[in-house]
Image: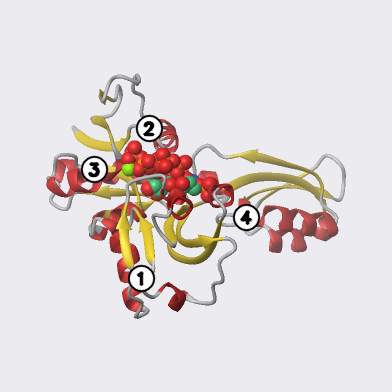
Amino acid sequence: MIRLAIQKSGRLSEDSLSLIRECGIGFLSSTFKLKTEATNFPLEILFLRDDDIPGYVQDGVADLGIVGQNVLVEAGLMPLEVEPLGFSKCRLSLAVPRGQAYDSVNDLQGKNIATSYPQLLGSYLAERGVQAHLHTISGSVEIAPSIGLADAICDIVSSGSTLLGNGLREVETVFRSEAVLIANQNLSAEKQELLDQLRFRMQAVRRARRNKYIVLNAPVAALDAVKALLPGIKSPTVTPLAEEGWVSVQSVVNEDDFWHVTDRLKAVGAEGILVLPIEKMIA
Ligand SMILES: Nc1ncnc2c1ncn2[C@@H]1O[C@H](COP(=O)(O)OP(=O)(O)OP(=O)(O)O)[C@@H](O)[C@H]1O
Ligand SMILES: O=P(O)(O)OC[C@H]1O[C@H](OP(=O)(O)OP(=O)(O)O)[C@H](O)[C@@H]1O
Ligand SMILES: [Mg+2]
């Protein structure tokens, strides 16, 4: 049995649970139960505060964990990271009151800055030769300037609406983060085997999320152009249509390139383009 710690409730919880489920692992969860066992995989899930997860994994209380890189780096435990997970993407940024002049990070010299990330911010400022007074607070950091607690703040930003709602302007990106799978560095051979199985499944889920299955009809004359646009995993599947001079092409396309590729496929004569989600994708 391998033990995985995930956030009990917050920005990582829902995506962590969906990823486990999409890996084909079933379990019962209830708001009040802080520990559950998977029904079809030797996995125990612990529901914790995210800040506690890196330390628990380091100490072997949990074998694995899912946390933001920001929390991992702040705890000084980067070597535990084994797999980026592609969700909870955000940045740790410096922000100042909107009306305040700001040219460069040197303007923060001698200023009071409120943050929950004193290590990350401290090394960012030290690398730039800026000395500031850091006030560590554990939440609602964006309120600090408006109540006279600080001149600037350094906190997590995603859409920017919390900064906007509190009259703040983002001025520097200190760190970019996403959720990662972390693992204890002294796992037994049996647990290492289970970790490898989990990583294999997680990679298949992530690859599937990043790609779409595409099916289209094209005139034979356009086939070379279509193939160049849709290289697929190995090469596209091409089958003749009942109508003379036409083929059906099936392939895989990266979601980021999807609209751009579709426009070009239409331009070379492709028709009846269907796009389907992929559930799992094994390399
Ligand atoms: N607005 C956001 N958008 C995307 N990801 C975010 C956002 N805010 C935070 N995160 C990421 O999710 C992680 C957890 O954020 P959350 O705000 O739920 O933490 P928390 O309040 O410290 O939770 P806990 O109660 O577990 O200590 C952060 O460490 C960060 O990696
Ligand atoms: O740029 P935005 O999209 O507005 O997101 C940023 C906010 O999200 C996080 O807090 P969260 O809402 O998770 O609340 P918390 O203070 O309880 O952690 C973070 O601490 C910011 O305050
Ligand atoms: Mg926390």
Amino acid marked by disc 2: Ser
Amino acid marked by disc 1: Tyr
The residue carrying mark 3 is: 52
Query: Which comes before the other along the chain, label 1 or label 2?
Result: 2
Looking at the rendered structure, the secondary structure element under dot 2 is loop
What x and y, as percent, mark residue 33? 28, 20
Q: CA distance from mark 2 to mark 3?
A: 13 Å
Query: Which comes before the other along the chain, label 4 or label 3?
Result: 3
The residue carrying mark 1 is: 124
User: Residues at badges 1 and 4 in contact (C-beta under 8 Å)?
Assistant: no
**Where residue 247 is drawn, which disc sits there?**
none
Q: CA distance from mark 1 to mark 2?
A: 29 Å
Q: Nearer the viewer, mark 4 or mark 3?
A: 3
User: Observer-nearest residue: 116 or 274?
Assistant: 116
Query: Which comes before the other along the chain, label 1 or label 3?
Result: 3
Residue plotted at (28% across, 29% down): 41
Q: Is residue 124 left or right of residue 53?
A: right
The residue carrying mark 2 is: 9
Q: CA distance from mark 4 to mark 2?
A: 30 Å
If the picture is divided into quarters, which one holds ligand 1? top left
User: Observer-nearest residue: 94 or 223?
Assistant: 94
Looking at the rendered structure, the secondary structure element under dot 4 is helix
User: Residues at badges 1 and 3 in contact (C-beta under 8 Å)?
Assistant: no
Amino acid marked by disc 4: Asp
User: Neighbour class for label 4 at 10 Å: few (<14), some, many (≥20)?
Assistant: few
User: Residues at badges 1 and 2 in contact (C-beta under 8 Å)?
Assistant: no
The residue carrying mark 4 is: 256
Q: CA distance from mark 1 to mark 4?
A: 31 Å
User: Residue farthest to the front?
Assistant: 148
